[in-house]
Image (cartoon, coloured by chain):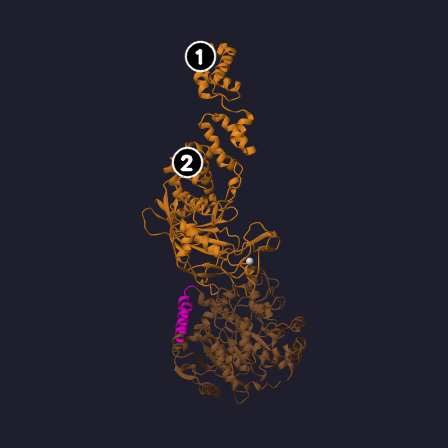
Amino acid sequence: MPYESVIGLEVHAQLLTESKIFCGCSTRFGAAPNQHTCPVCLGLPGVLPVLNKKVVDFALRAALATHCTIAPTSRWARKNYFYPDLPKGYQISMYELPIAEHGHVEVAALRPDSGQAQGQAKKVCLTRIHMEEDAGKSIHDAEAGASLVDLNRTGVPLLEIVSEPDIRSAAEAGHYLRSLRTLLQYIEVCDGNMEEGSLRCDANVSIRPQGNAELGTRTEIKNLNSFRAVEKAIEHEIQRQSEVVEAGGRVVQETRLWDADREVTRPMRSKEFAHDYRYFPDPDLLPLVVDQAWVEHVQADLPELPAARRARFIHDYGLPVYDAEVLTARKDVADYFEASVRACPAVPKVVSNWVMDSVLRFVKEEKLDAALKIETWPCSPEHLGMLIGLIQDGTISTTIAKTIYEEMRQTGHPPEEIIEAKGLRQVSDTDTLQAAITEVLTANPDKVEAYRGGREKLLGFFVGQVMRATQGKANPQMVNTLLRQQLSQ
Amino acid sequence: MSHYALTIHQAQEKLRAREVSAVELSQAVLNRIQDTDQHLHSYLTVCAEEALAQAETADRTLANGVTPPPLCGIPIALKDVILAQGVRSTAGSKILEHFVSPYDATVTQHLKEAGAVIIGKVNCDEFAMGSSNENSAFAPCRNPWDTDRVPGGSSGGSAACVAADQTCAALGTDTGGSIRLPAAFCGIVGLKPTYGRVSRFGVVAYASSLDQVGPCTKDVRDCALLLEVIAGYDPRDSTSVNRPTPSYTAHLERGVSGLRIGIPQEYFIEGMQPEVETAVRDAIAHLSTLGAEIVPISLPHTEYAIASYYIIAMAEASSNLARYDGVRYGYRAAEVEDLGALYQTTRAQGFGSEVKRRIALGTYVLSAGYYDAYYVKAQKVRTLIRQDFLSAFEACDIIATPVAPTTAFRLGEKLADPLTMYLSDIFTIAVNLAGLPGLSVPCGFDQHGLPIGLQLIGRPFDEEALLQAGYAYEQDHDWRARKPPL
Ligand SMILES: [Zn+2]
């Protein structure tokens, strides 16, 4: 029987605020264990949480960027469970009244990172977005007979973004997650680094006979800390559930853990998760009231979102969909492209080619895009635009431009300066070119003979020789024309 | 009069007149503790050395000639749930027996800034859970008027040490009557301020939506003075309210002329100790002779207060006390097998039986399937109780009731039956549920010479009216001239 898979994702995004959600400690990653702690995030007796308003700003950014309805009043709740990296014995989260509900994420038709087609563009609906505090980290195998606890991460703000079960395949789950990550990076609330855990994902997976409206029993898969893990684990889980049902069995509602090494999911031991979190409103915090003015303030500060920017790139610059998606996958790349276009407004498509071929390839090779914002570019967007302008007005050839680009990357000098210093200006003077051509033809009488005998492919050889003789500075179009003339004489 | 017997305002005068030095005063109090505490067990920690050092600093300030801060050189004791930096804070529990706080509670900070001498940490029911002080994990504190009787709880140490002149004044906390009940049982003045009036930061939480710190003092003027020092908005406590603190001492002598005092029929019940009812009714009659208008009122949801209170308080407590898990600080069970055993053994050995009872009940009422039936319903009742009070305050300005149905009972008398014990708070609990201020003022003694307390309840943030009425009553009665037989 053909089955349809029904998937919803719960994403936890660490927010890029300077300080923690309920105390003044730093959120910076990589400090010595337990450096970024204070009585509040250590859960000492008598401490009380005080909400960091910036976290709400960030949540509102995400809520607006995903077209959510924002609750005028939302409420903090305690999620109670015992674990050594949870100092208070409860996590402050939101439960009955989250800050935002009923949004959606536009999933692009192309994979923004690779540009591969990923099927239809679609909307994945969001059930809710809420804020909560992160737990610390338990380290189990560093010391024999002991577990160590690092509470630096305790109280780092998180957004939990819960999707509707709108996703129908493992690949689509990956696409949704990539689109969501792009969006969060765009609005600068999360760096989206799955390996470092700043973006985490749990998946709810069920299957049902094709055409059935009723949902099947779902399992929750945890420990998905890469895009590959998300896709592989869901694929595996769909397969596993199908096999269970095919064999006449029933899927059990449970939480399963993805084992990335063995590429299987396995049920979590009941001790690894609590059954009843005993949520109740946190009496230490007032209900969160967000008025229209607050929402408008955040809205005014929101950048143009990827979907809108993509459409504008296609419309205003006449770019193909592919180019528009690649360029708008990151806000900084889109900004870079537009700054280059300002320096060379005539040929946006040529600028796009240069950004994608030369700039982005280098950025990827050097992993400059590992950070949320690319800090160092191979060259400034203005210089890139100028360089392309110089190709357009015939000052240099595309080949020479590649050399100049390398020089720009190494020295940071503007293209004109490099051209002058190295004498790389294109040679378009007919007499000079004629002289060079004559010299080449004279030196190769046998090849001239062969050409005239019908081996027209040899034209490329002559062009190469002329270019070499002019250190690549000859205007290639003119060389072509003049060569044909001389050879046909 | 011995120095240790001074009230705050008497001590202020003597210190400023240099009739007594701050060091002499603190020393006198320390000696008094030394001489009497083996009978009372008011103190869990005496900060003799630090107190004398603080007193020396106070003496230097007093010698400067400029106006000293309000509590300069005045010994104040803290209930052991209120944290003071570098001082052991047990909260009356074995689980925190050796816990030394690395920070000051906001109220402690206010006291220090006002020049107070923190004389020590006083006894209480474990995590402020109890009405008799018998739930202290250490020795139970005893009533100075009769050491076979309880001082009331949970701030029993705070009330007993003030009554026994082991300090000038103390701070307690009140979640369901924990300041007012011991104040009544020990014959002192105790105030539970409006919820949000005083910061809870640095106060070991029992039930966060009900807890409030308040003064335990020898008279009403001291109560006003001490409240003035500790009250105010604290950005570290989101539930503290950002509104200016009035000067409670400035208009203390305004009197009660024209004040409408509501008498709720539900607070004079069958089975009350007759002397208590008589004393309270006499006190109300006296206020009437001073010009107050007596208005009968009704608080119809009173009978649901205890049930609602215990559900909410226990639910919050079950979560608030989860942090005592043996992982980071406090008691940790030795030689356990695994994590589960670490939690279970640490908490089984570290907590006393009443605390465990409340954690268990609180966990139960928050559990899936029971949450709506208990917790949600209790919150609805709480809203109704608050509405009862707010509509009553349309007809009256303050409300007068007894603090408790009886005077202090004997140790062990109610220990076996938690429900009877919970009934001690029957007149005080609704005030916490409604978040209102409540004052306990001595209004007589029973035939055994045990103090009786009058409770005055006010509108939110109207502590001033309570203090004025309490002061007017107190000026005409010499109950405080009587001293416990120690
Ligand atoms: Zn912190």
Along the viewing direction, whichever of A454 and B115 lies nearer the viewer: B115
Work out whether A338 lies above or below B60: above
Colour assigned to chain A in the rendering is: orange
Whether the residue carrying mark 2 lies under 8 Å from ligand 1 is answered with no
Q: Which residue is mark 2?
A: A323
| Residue at the outermost bottom position | B447
Residue A487: which numbered mark, if any? Answer: 1
B28 sits to left or right of A402: right
Q: How many marks can you see?
A: 2
Q: Nearer the viewer, mark 2 or mark 1?
A: 1
Along the viewing direction, whichever of A161 and A300 lies nearer the viewer: A300
Q: Position of residue B7 (x, y in %)?
A: 59, 80
Q: Position of residue B368 (x, y in %)?
A: 42, 63
A405 sits to left or right of A243: right
Callout 2: residue from which chain?
A: A
Image: magenta residue range: B368-388
B18 sits to left or right of A451: right
Q: Quadrant of ligand 1?
A: bottom right
B283 sits to left or right of B66: left
Question: Label 2 is placed on what type of residue?
Answer: Asp
